[in-house]
Image: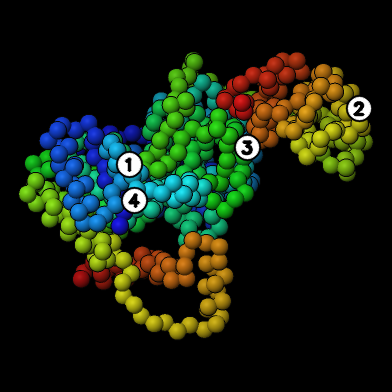
Amino acid sequence: MRVYFTADNQAEERLQKTFSQIIDTLNDSGVLVMSNLANRNLVGWPTQDLEKIEQSGESMIEKMDALIIEGTRPLAESGYLIAIALAHHKPILYLCLKDKIINQNLIHLKKDHQAAKLLNLEYYTVKNLNEILVEFLRKIETGEGKETPNIKFTLRITSRIERYLQWKTHNTRLTKADFLRELIEGLIDKDKDYQNFADKE
Amino acid sequence: MVIPRKKIILFICHQSASLRPQDWQEPMADLNIIADVEPVLLFTQPSADLTPQTWFRLAKEIYQRLNKAEGFIVLHGIDNILYTSSAVSFLLQNLNKSIIFAGVKSDQPDSRKIEIRANLINACQTATYKLPEVCLMFGNRLIRASQSVESNDASLNAFNAPLSGTLGRIDFSVRIYDKAVFNPKGKPKLFDSLNEKIQTITLSPLIDYKNLASQIADKEGIVVNANSYRNLPTELINFLSKKAADLPVVIWNQSFKDPLFLPKNIITIQNMTWPTTVTKFMWATGVAKNPKAVKELMAKNIAGEIIS
């Protein structure tokens, strides 16, 4: 699993220690961490992969499984990173020390049905930080929150549908299954009756 | 924590079946995390139908709002985007704000959706920086509009630019190269004239010079795309030599080994892209009073368009 971790690299020493604790916990859990903090950015990326990404026009964050932000101190780029992560359907963990205040714009964003599924805002103390991180990783791995497709079922289709799927996904980065999943997600998003039903539940 | 709220104006200059209003309306919530984004509808047809009147209107609308926003995004179709963006870079000079053109390249409905969202978010973030340029934001590159050419490869980078025109890249953030950030040399200036009485000619063996003579009768400049030629046809040189005495003539060819054989009053352009050559010529013939002055302006670096 690859996670991008960002925090204010000018923060005071006490916070810098917390940042190290976050990275260590993630590393101990087998996560490859990329970060804006010194000596952490792009460590572990094979040069060939970097060249491929550059040529394809994709951004690095597309290649991440999740984004973690330590936002106790204001971080100019956090808004951008959250926006781009949401656009790419990546789960986000936004951490803030317990006695500090999370920006109202982010709290407001939690009211958005789609964003709320991906955006996790958490107050932490030094004591429960590891627990929060491990729980976030568990949610990603089990599909909770991120809604990883982990339910398998067999669908029999006609050769006409198969031909269509082949044509539709040829020369794209989508697999046939991805295409069908996105199609159904689109239907769910547009289905107002279902939205009402789901909200009541 | 306080995220500074900056104002960005998003001009919509393209609408079609493949880029519907909801395609840019849906990412607005994401864009508003970064800044206060105000959309302005400017052209609600496919960008292939854009004319120089819209270029001028766009430049004017931006100029009138220069003090009201931190930066500007122009949502534009792939068609004509190089002409529109180049024209804006000549119409609006000494810029003190970013003007970022973005759009979508992919033909697949599903990938289009995420591409437009990502390009708009990247453009929005870039527009909040102090980058006084007209740029294109597609895929993971930020490039100078007036040095850009369309890319034919299958990547999300719809356009390419030489190193001198590459201003930044996207990895985990928008990284602007130091060379791209500079202070403008004066107050922003809006030019109110682009000469539309320009004849563009693409060289081929089918050119009928008699017909051409009547076509250019009321024109105030000629620009010839001779990029696929190593040597120019003798009949063309004779034809243009006569015309160049009265009106400015540009020959665009990026591979001429020795352009010296051409008559002196013909302007040869080798270090600019074709859309930039055309729009700069329209601007220069609108500003300059005689062919000599046009020649001087065409040689001068106005908006970072000259490829070194």
Closer mark to the observer between disc 3 and disc 2? 2
Chain under label 2? B
Please tell me whether mark 3 sits on a helix, a strand or a loop.
helix
Say which label, 3 or 2, has the lower sequence index: 3
Structural distance between the alpha carbons of marks 3 and 2? 30 Å
Tag shown at residue B238: 2
Please tell me whether mark 4 sits on a helix, a strand or a loop.
helix
Left or right for B194, reference B40: right
Q: Residue at x 40, y 69 (%)?
A: A181
Determine whether B179 is above or below A176 in the image: above
- Which one is nearer the viewer's eye here, B194 or A96? A96
Left or right for B113, reference A79: right
The residue that label 1 is drawn on is A41
Q: Is residue B51 in view?
A: yes
Please tell me whether mark 2 sits on a helix, a strand or a loop.
helix
Closer mark to the observer between disc 1 and disc 3? 1
Left or right for B9, reference B235: left
Inspect the image, locate mark 1, and give the three-letter code of the amino acid beneath it.
Answer: Asn
Inspect the image, locate mark 2, and give the three-letter code of the amino acid beneath it.
Answer: Asn
Same-chain check, marks 4 and 3: no
The residue that label 4 is drawn on is A85
| Labelled pair 4, 3 in contact (Cβ < 8 Å) | no
Label 1 crowd (10 A; few <14 / some 14-19 / many >=20): some
Q: Residue at x 33, y 44 (%)?
A: A43
Structural distance between the alpha carbons of marks 1 and 2? 61 Å
Inspect the image, locate mark 3, and give the three-letter code of the amino acid beneath it.
Answer: Tyr
Same-chain check, marks 1 and 2: no
Tag shown at residue B83: 3
Label 3 crowd (10 A; few <14 / some 14-19 / many >=20): many
| Labelled pair 3, 2 in contact (Cβ < 8 Å) | no
